[in-house]
Image (cartoon, rainbow, N blue to C red):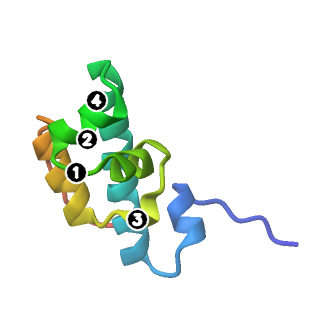
Amino acid sequence: MEIQSFDNVWDALTDTPAEAANMTARSDLLIALQRAIGSWGLTQEAAAKRLGITRPRISDLLSGKISKFSLDALVNLAAQAGLAVEIHVSEAA
């Protein structure tokens, strides 16, 4: 049995480098949003209102249901949360 190693979990779980890059960006944004929302000390209802989304949607976000959020949606939520989103592009290893 050959042992494989990966730079991150998405490299192991996705079929293409493009999918891995998308999932990495989405998970980074999801985690940043979870931290920001947690720091507000608000109820889910109040946090949802602050972000302009429904309470079930905030529940999905806080539960880490990444498949329910596109990269665009997460970027928009991050901006609404007052987070600065930066993209760094470099040559692949």
Give residue 13's position: percent from left, percent from top.
58, 69
Q: Which residue is mark 3?
A: 68
State the image quarter where residue 24 is shown: bottom left
* Amino acid at the residue labelled 2: Ala
Tag 1–tag 3 contact (CB < 8 Å): no
Q: Quick one: SS at disc 3?
A: helix
How far is disc 4 from disc 1 in space, using C-alphas? 15 Å
Q: Earlier in the sequence, mark 4 or mark 1?
A: 4
Give residue 55's position: percent from left, percent from top.
33, 46
State the image quarter where residue 25 is shown: bottom left
Q: Quick one: SS at disc 4?
A: helix
How far is disc 1 from disc 2 in space, using C-alphas? 5 Å
Give residue 65's position: percent from left, percent from top.
48, 56
Tag 1–tag 2 contact (CB < 8 Å): yes
- The 10 Å Cα crowd at callout 2, few under 14, some 14 to 19, many 20 or more, is some
Q: What label sits on residue 36 in the rendered view? A: 4
Tag 4–tag 2 contact (CB < 8 Å): no
Quadrant where the N terminus sits is: bottom right
Q: Quick one: SS at disc 1?
A: loop
Q: Where 14 sits versus 91, above or below?
A: below
Residue appearing at x 43%, y 68% in the figure: 20
